[in-house]
Image: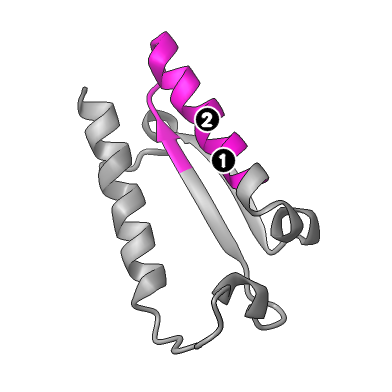
Amino acid sequence: MNRIICFLFLLSVAIGVYACSGSSSSSPNALSSLATGKKIEVFYFHFTRRCMTCNNLEKVSKDAVETQFAAQVKNGEITFKSGNKESCGWNV
């Protein structure tokens, strides 16, 4: 349960940072107007031991990014990365 709360917290922080980045674009699809050289990285942090739900959450998250932002993923503007929190030494 802590892992899910941690993931949701990190996801909300990432969305908040992106939303408050100062980009005041009036276009309905702000992602289509990314400046050249800018990149969005979507991170999914997990622990070494994961249950079936944790594995499914990663799969669904990755599928959502790749489906909803297929053009940006194909162009390399958006990437999805999964990382083991315990092996990288980060304390979240």
Residue 60, disc: 2
| Picture coordinates of residue 56, whole percent (x, y) | 48, 20
For residue 76, what is the image quadrant?
Answer: bottom right
Instruction: Please report the residue visible at 39 percent of the width from the left and 10 percent of the height from the top.
Output: 51
Relative side of 25 to 37, left or right: left
Q: Say which quarter of the image contains residue 85.
A: top left
Instruction: Classify 10 Å Cα crowding around label 1: few (below 14), some (14-19), many (20 and above).
Output: few
Mark 2 surroundings within 10 Å by alpha-carbon count, few (fewer than 14), some (14 through 19), many (20 or more): few
Q: Amino acid at mark 2?
A: Val
Which residue is drawn at the image coordinates 55% and 57% (left, top)? Answer: 41
Instruction: Give the residues drawn in magenta, as a range.
Output: 44-66
Q: Nearer the viewer, residue 75 or 3?
A: 75
Cα gap from disc 1 to disc 2, whole angstroms: 6 Å
Which dot marks residue 64?
Answer: 1
- Looking at the rendered structure, the kind of residue marked 1 is Ala
Q: Residue furthest right?
A: 74
